[in-house]
Image (cartoon, grey):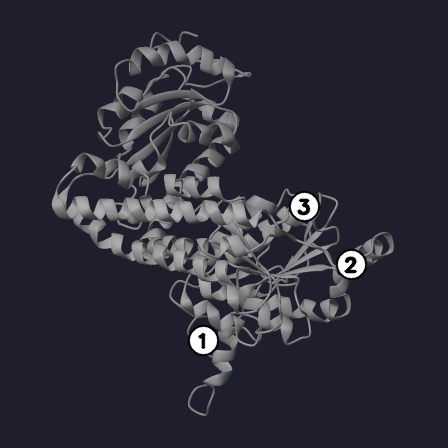
Amino acid sequence: MPAAGRGFSVYYHNRYLYSRYNPQAAPIKTAISFDILPNTLVLVFSPLLGYGLKELIDKLPDDSVILLIEADEELFKLSNEYLQQIIKNKKNIYNVCIADGKSFFSLFNQNLLPAFSNFKRCLPIELSGGAQLYKLFYHSLTALADNAINQFWRNRITLVKLGRLYARNIFKNLGRVPFADYLKIKSVIKPIVVCGSGPSVENIIPFLQKNSDDCFVISVDNALMTLIKSGIFPDAVIAVESQLAIEKAYIGSCGTRIPIIADLTSRPHVMELTGGKVSFFLSEYEQCNYLDRIKKILNIVTMVPLGSVGLAAMEIALTLRKDESIPVFFCGLDFSFKPCKTHCRETPSHRKLLDEHNRLSTILCGESSFDANSFYFTGKDGKASITTPALSGYGKTFSARYSNVQNTFDIATEGMDTNIKKKSLENVLEIVQHFRRNIDTTARIKIHENDNQISCLEKVKKFLIDELKSLEELRTILITGKKTEKIIPIIKEREYLYLHFPDGYKEPTLDISFLNRIRAEIDFFIKDIKFSLNFLEENTKT
């Protein structure tokens, strides 16, 4: 629609999407007002006729991208011909029509857009009134992009700190896989209770003392002794922690024979601590070739990296339940804490507090409660609780992932509200009694199954031997300088050698500093592979 001789406006859904008198003025002024920093993903919502777009392109850094997004198909058809004239032969400008978050992520997953690793920030810009037609959707896309970029860099920080340990634990645990049992999915036919290590789990203990036989109880590792000391022996404990410190959580559990469901990245010695059956799952902490090769030889449950043992426990619970008719209750997943009490009693941190208490060291230790990064919020009980950015992030992830999952219920009375339907213990008891009347809840449920151990043993052994040969070949090449053309192909199949480097998300190169670092890593993994091969040999004999 012509607008007083100063260009065209757009009339749609009974409203003008540009000014009726000077449609170009406001978009150009908006575009000029923004400064685009390097490594920015610029989201332009409802660009329509492209007013202001030239001004944005002129100031776009070479390492940044402009993504033009339209949610309305009719508006996209109208605007596309105008936009193509502006962005023709321009680099790093993309024009798309998407209607949901899944479509947004598919653009990145299918490599139609540069990966999130190319960006350090997201900049949303509205250049027309069309952005107001789908305001909530566009806001959600901004949040998704922000979260994806932030999550990538948080994961990078974690990988730099722990990436080598994850990979080393995987190779050590591979020797144990043939002698472990496989997790039997959809095997639990009675109500499941997931117990985290937050303070709220203490409120559920009297209920579990009376009704644990009629429930399938899953405990995170940190809450294990809390339950055992109360006379509750969980049906499974979830182990995901890769570091030595987690072994303190198992002190007192020896001989209980409680089954362990462990991430392949978790600390290997933990598998021996309770004396129970062990089964593995794999958190794909990075999309890479070496994990894909491991998945091909193992019949193993895989899941996305969730960062928190509480989220992993919930994921395992949903994997184990027979179908959506089986309720999953959770408590102790507070994602917060009370002043001077970060975990429930009998956890390592609580025991340490009691052990160190004396006349000079008060039991009311506020060091963690009043850390510079801690902040207060109102919990589900209406009282003040404390959380941290990390805990709060896990809570938001938990809410986003499970708030729409059928038959999941929050039975804790304190902590962060995860927007999941709540149930009182009286309601939970009614549900448990209903299952008790209709099924034999006292029957032992088998969550493990034996696969062809010999076949698995042969596959794992061959994989380890092949890896050992490849690493020894790579080491020889790096020392002698011969057959250098093999270096990159070998390294690309073995990302564990460099993923934990600060620049590990980039493509491997023949740069001498990079290869020197690779050379230093090889001996670690040769040692771990030989450890697993010896473990296989010794246990095969017995």
Viewer-side label of 1, 2: 2
Rendered position, 140 above or below 98: below
Residue 126 locus on image (x, y percent): 40, 28
Viewer-side label of 3, 1: 3
Q: Secondary structure at mark 2?
A: loop
User: Which label belongs to residue 449?
Assistant: none
Q: Report if the CB atoms under discs 2 and 3 are less than 8 Å apart.
A: no
Q: Label 3 belongs to which residue?
A: 186
Q: Residue furthest bottom?
A: 359
Q: Is residue 114 visible?
A: yes
Q: Residue furthest front?
A: 541
Residue type at the position of mark 2: Ala
Q: Is residue 364 visible?
A: no
Corner quadrant of residue 87: top left
Q: Would residue 437 be found to the left or right of residue 286 on screen? A: right
Determine crowd level at label 1: few under 14, some 14-19, many 20+ residues with C-alpha closer than 10 A. Answer: few
Q: Nearer the viewer, residue 189 or 122?
A: 189
Residue type at the position of mark 1: Gly
> Considering only order in the chain, which callout, 1 or 3, is on the residue closer to the N terminus?
3
Residue type at the position of mark 3: Lys
Residue 164 locus on image (x, y percent): 33, 54
Q: Would residue 414 be found to the left or right of residue 34 on screen? A: right
> Considering only order in the chain, which callout, 2 or 1, is on the residue closer to the N terminus?
1
Q: Label 2 belongs to which residue?
A: 443
Residue at image point 71% right, 45% down: 322
Residue 470 locus on image (x, y percent): 29, 44
Q: Would residue 185 be found to the left or right of residue 429 on screen? A: left
Q: Nearer the viewer, residue 237 or 367?
A: 237
Rendered position, 145 above or below 274: above
> Considering only order in the chain, which callout, 3 or 2, is on the residue closer to the N terminus?
3
Quadrant, the N terminus:
top left
Q: Label 1 belongs to which residue?
A: 366
